Amino acid sequence: MSFLNENPKLILENIKELLIIGVKERKHSFHTPVFTNINQEGVAVSRIVVLRHFDKKNLILNFHTDFRSPKISGIQNNNYSFFLFYDSKLKIQLRIQSSSFVNNQNLITKKIWDKISLSSRKCYLTKKAPSSNTLIPDDGIPKHLIGIDPSKEESETGYKNFCVIESNITKIDWLYLDSSGHRRLKIEFKKNVPYFNWTIP
């Protein structure tokens, strides 16, 4: 990593490469970042999400979720959001500030839905919404689907619950930890043009 440490443009390109790898490789630590948004009560709420796509040109991250999830109303009320990535082997932390938007039953979700496996579609067939109370430990999946996938026809009823969260990157705080000297770079985007500032780690 030493060759990157003094060149902001190379660092940004490396960040983009890592996000692309995070989408493609399930075992990569960037595949499951922490996503934080503000809920209806004005409280910051965090959870692990699966990074599904990164638009390198337009600087957009996306993940999938259930439209009935509490995070949806939070995003619709306040689209300010954060992603946190960390890789202990690379010793890189990324704190990404973004503006998030909800896609549901539109061209974006339809295109992605058509490519989703039946096992993934099953997650959107729950009768109760995510975060609903339950008297017993239960995942909400219909009993007749335990251990099996739904038919394609049956899975289509879950489409209304499927949504794609698109997050436009506005700032990146890059931190590289090394015994020879830590490095920290802040990158702010204005109309997708990067502006760089070195800061003390």
Image: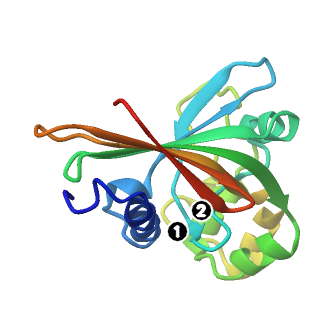
**Disc number for residue 145:** 2
Look at the image and tell me in which quarter the C terminus lies: top left
Q: Quadrant of residue 40?
A: top right
> Looking at this view, is 80 or 185 the one in front?
185
Is residue 117 left or right of 38 when viewed as pictured? left
Q: Tell me which residue sits at (57%, 72%) in the image.
A: 56
Check if mark 1's residue and mark 2's residue have beta carbons within 8 Å: yes
What is the x, y in percent for residue 6?
30, 55
What is the x, y in percent for residue 81?
67, 39
Look at the image and tell me in which quarter the N terminus lies: bottom left
Q: Tell me which residue sits at (53%, 58%) in the image.
A: 146
> Looking at this view, is 36 or 120 the one in front?
36
Q: Tell me which residue sits at (51%, 56%) in the image.
A: 50
> Looking at this view, is 44 or 110 the one in front?
44
Residue 96 sits above or below residue 57 on the image: above
In the structure shown, which secondary structural element does the residue marked by tag 1 occupy?
A: loop
